[in-house]
Amino acid sequence: MRVKLSFLTKVMLLLMLMMACITAVIGSLLIQQSNTAIDTQHQVVQQQNMHRYALLNTLLTDRILLWAETFTQDKSGLPASVSELQSAIEDARNTMQMSLQIDNVWLFNAQEVLVYGDDREMPGFVVDLRSKALKTLRPQVLTSCAHLCRRYIAAPVMTQNAEPAVMVFATGMQELLALLSRSADVGRIAIARGSDNAESMTVISRLSAANKKAVTAIIQALPPNTSIASLTTQGSRVVYENRLLLVSLLPILDGRVSDSYILFARDITEQVRSASVYQNWVVGSAVGLVAVFALLLYLILNQYRSRLMALSQRLPLLAEHRYKEFNKSASRSRPLQNKRLTDELDVLEEAASNLAHELETIDSKMALTTAQLENMAMFDVLTGLPNRNMLMFQMEKEVSLATRQNAPLGLLFLDLDDFKRINDSHGHDVGDKLIQAAAQRINGPLRESDMAARFGGDEFVILLPSLDTVCQVELVANRLIQAFEAPIQFDNHQFYVSLSIGLAFCNDSDTTAMELLRHADIAMYEAKAEQGSAYCKFDVSMNQRVMRRVELEKEARIGLNDNQFSLALQPQLCLHTRKLVGMEALIRWHHPEKGPISPAEFIPLLENTSLMMTIDYWVIEQAINMAAQIKARGYTGIKMAINISAAHFLDPALPKFIERQLKQYAVEPHMIELELTETALVADITRASATLETLRAMGCLIAIDDFGTGYSSLGYLKALPADFIKIDRSFVSGMLESDDDRSIVASTVSMVRGMGLTVVAEGIETLQQFAMLDQFGCHQGQGYLFSPPIPQAQLWQQLNESLDAGVWKLPVQ
C-alpha cells in the first residue's frame, strides 16, 4: 500500500491550520480592537466636547454675570438706580460688544417694565426669561437658534431702594465655537440644523464664505441616509481635500429647538493611517509567525516522517527474511541517535530492530528444525532408513517411470518372525536394538539403486527399480533369508530371527503404488503361514482369499448379532469303560443364504482378525452355559472342552472373563477344559506358562491340542502345566497302516501316562483304532466311531439314544 498522505504530514497540516486559525483570530481581534479604538476614541472625544461645551458655556455666562454685577454699582460701590443703569448701559455698549460679544441688552425694572432696549428686537421668550429671573432672583440662560444661534442671559440685579431689576443680554456663539475649536482641536466647527438625516442639515452659524463652503461640502460628502442620531452617537467618516475627517454632532445645551447641533469635523487621517499601519503589522506578524511555525514544524516533523517512511520501507524486508539489508538500512537511518533524549520513534525503531533480531533467530531455529522435521518426515529415527512417507513418494515416482519405460519393478514386504515375543519378553530397548541390527542386515544384499524402508514396527519394504528380469526379486529374497541364518548378537543377547517376505511385481501400466504395496503385504502373510524363513510371490488367488476374508469377517459380525452361530458338541469317552466323560464344544455357522459354512474355512481366515477374539468369548460363554445345562439335566461329571485361539489365549482379560462366567452359570472350574494348540503355546512360552498357571489356579483343566504336530513337542511337556494331551487325528488315522504312526502313538501314550497326564486320542473312526488305542493304554478318545459333533438343539435327544446307564453305545460295524 502506498502512502498518499503521511500521518505526520496530516499532523503538520493540522497544527499549521490550528496555528493559522489562532493567529487569524488574534489578528482579527487586534484589528477589530484597532478599529474599535477609533470609535471608542470618538465617543470619548464626544463626551469631552460635551463637557467642554458645558464648561465654556458656563464660563462665558459667568463672565457676563460677573461683569453685570460690577456694572450695576456706582463709584461708591452702592447699587445704582435704574436711570443710572440706563445711562451706564448706553455708555458701555461698545465695550460690551467688543469685550463680551454682547449684541443687545434689555433692562427691566421691578415692575417688569422695559426701561431700556428696543422691544422690536426682543424675542418673545425674553419676557418669560425675565419673569423667571425676577421670581427666583437667579440668573436664567437660554440658547435660541431661530435664525442665528444666540445666547440669552437674564441677570437679576439690585438697584437703589433694594428694588430688583433684570438685565437681559443677547450674545453670539462665535466665541464659544472658537473656544471649542481650539480646545477640541477640530479642523471645522459650525452650528447646523437638521431633522432626520444628514441630507436635511443646513449651516446656521456665522461663518466666512470659505469656511461655510467647506462645512457645506463636508455635510454633502456624508454618506446618503446618514441619520442625525448616528452622527451624534458614532459619527461618520468623510474624505475632504485628501484628508479623512470624522464628522460628529453635539446637541446644543439648554436650547429651545431640538434640531440644532454643533458640527465637529475632526481630522483623523493620521490616526487612521497609524491604525492601518498597525493592522498591516498585525497581519504581517501573523503571516510571518505562521510561516516560521510551519518551517519549524516541518524541520521537526519531517525527520520523523522520513524515518517513519524509511521504517515502513524496511519492514517488508522482514517478511522477505532479508535481515542484513534491514539492519544495514536501520543503521543508515539513525547515524546520530541520541541515547539520552530518546522518543517514541526511537523506541519503535529499537523494537523493530529487536523484532528483526528475534525473527532472524527464529528463522535460523526454524530452518534447523525444518531440516530435522523433513528428515524425520522422510527417514525413520530408529534405523535411519527411509520411512513410509519417503517410501510412498519414491514408489509413486518409480511406478510412473516403470510404466513409461515398460521395465519391471519389484517390491519386497518383510516381517520379522516372532519379533513381538522377543519385544514383550525382553523389553522395548532390546526390541529397538534388534530392529536396528535387522535394518543393517537388510541393507547388505541391496544395490545402490535399491531402497530399503522401515514401514512400521518390525515391517520393512524394499523397492527394487530398473530390473532386468523378475527373477532378480527372488534372488534378493533368497539373499535376505540367508543373511538372517546367522544369529543377531548385541550386548549379551543372541537371537535367531527369521523373515517372512512377500514379493510383488509391477509390469502392468494399470498397477498403482498402493496396489503394489498391498500385493506384497498379502504375499507376506502367505509366507508367514509357512512358519518363517520363507518368501511368497503374489498371485491373484491371494487377493481373492483376502477379499474372501474381508467378506467373511463382515458377514461373521452380522452373524454374531443375528444368532447365526451355534455350538456342536462331540462326546469324549473313557476308552476302557466307554463312559461319557466330556464334550468338546465346536462352533458352527449357518449362513441364511450360503447355508452351513465349515469352521475349516472361516476360522483360518478370521484367525488374525479382531473378530476372532469376539467369537472366542462368545464360544466360552455358550459352552459354560451348556455345561450348566448338562449338569442341570442330571449328567454329572461331564467336563466341557473349549478351544481357545492363540491371540485369545494371550489376552490378559481371559482369566477374569472365565471366572465371571463360571460364577454367573454356577459351574465348577474343574468342569471346564481349555484346549490350546501346541503352536499357540510355544509361540510365547513365557506368557503361555503364566496364563496356564493362572487358569489352573482357578481350577480349570488345560489340554494341549494337536500334540505332535508342533515344535519339539516332547521338550515342552515339562514346561507346560497341562492336564490333558490330545494326540492329533493324523497319527490316529494312519497307525493301522503305518508302523511309524503306530510307534508315535504308542510312545506318546506311554510317555504321557508316565508323566501322570491324561492322554486323549482324536479322530477315532473304526473299532480297530479303538481297540488298539485301548491296548496302548490311552485314557480317552473321541471321533466319528462314537458320534460326530452333535448340534446344540439335538443334544438331549442324542444323549437319550446313545447312553445306557452312562455307557456310550457303539455302532455295529
Image (tube, grey):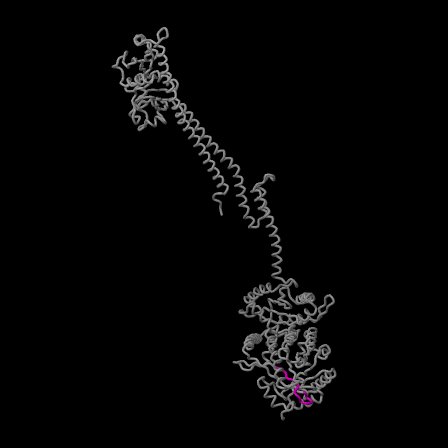
Residue 580 magenta: yes
Which residue appears at 31% of the width and 29% of the height?
A: 225
Is 532 rendered above or below residue 319?
Answer: below
Looking at the rendered image, the quarter that the C terminus falls into is: bottom right
Residue 120 spot, x, y in % from top left: 25, 14
Q: Residue furthest top?
A: 75
Residue 237 spot, x, y in % from top left: 36, 26
Is 3 rendered above or below residue 219?
Answer: below
Q: Is residue 505 left or right of residue 249?
A: right
Quadrant housing residue 778:
bottom right
Question: In the depicted view, which residue is nearer to us: 35 or 483?
Answer: 35
Residue 67 spot, x, y in % from top left: 36, 12
Residue 135 makes an appearance in the image: yes
Which residue appears at 60% of the width and 88% of the height?
A: 798
Residue 270 magenta: no
Provide the residue span drawn in magenta.
574-585
Q: Is residue 126 left or right of residue 336?
A: left
Q: Is residue 732 left or right of residue 133?
A: right
Which residue appears at 69% of the width and 65% of the height?
A: 429
